[in-house]
Amino acid sequence: MNLAFLAGHLKDKPEVSIEYFIADERKSGGAYQIVIGSVKRISLPERIITLSDGASIRMDDIVSITGNLFDSMAE
C-alpha cells in the first residue's frame, strides 16, 4: 500500500478509492466493498483511515488504495 505517500499528502485532501474486506458477523466469510472519498486522517497506532464523511476503515482490512494522487509517484 502507499500509506506513507498518502500520509504525506493529507493536506491536499486526496480522493481515493479503497477496496476492503468486511467480515460477516454471523458466519465464516464476508464481502469486499469499495468506497470513494477524501482521506481526512490516518492513525498509525490505531491502524485506521478516516474519510471526510466520517467512515473509518481498518488498515488490516484494506486490499487496495487507488487514486489520481498515486499517478505522480510514477513520474
Image: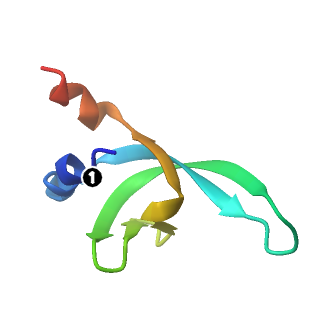
Q: In this view, does 28 lie above or below 68?
A: below
Q: Which amino acid does label 1 sit on?
A: Leu
Q: Judge from the rendering whether residue 31 lies leftward or rightward of residue 50; answer left or right.
A: right
Q: In which quarter of the image is the C terminus?
A: top left
Crowd band around label 1 with a 10 angstrom C-alpha radius: few (<14), some (14–19), many (20+): few
Q: Residue at x 25, y 54 (%)?
A: 13
Q: Is residue 15 above or below residue 58?
A: above
Q: Judge from the rendering whether residue 46 lies leftward or rightward of residue 7; answer left or right.
A: right
Give the image quarter of residue 67: top left
Give the image quarter of residue 24: bottom right
Q: Which residue is drawn at 67% across and 49% down?
A: 32
Instruction: Tell me the residue that label 1 is attached to.
Output: 3
Q: Which residue is drawn at 25% across and 36% down?
A: 69
Q: How many marks?
A: 1
Q: Judge from the rendering whether residue 19 lies leftward or rightward of residue 31; answer left or right.
A: left
Question: Where residue 52 appears, x then y in whole percent?
Answer: 39, 65
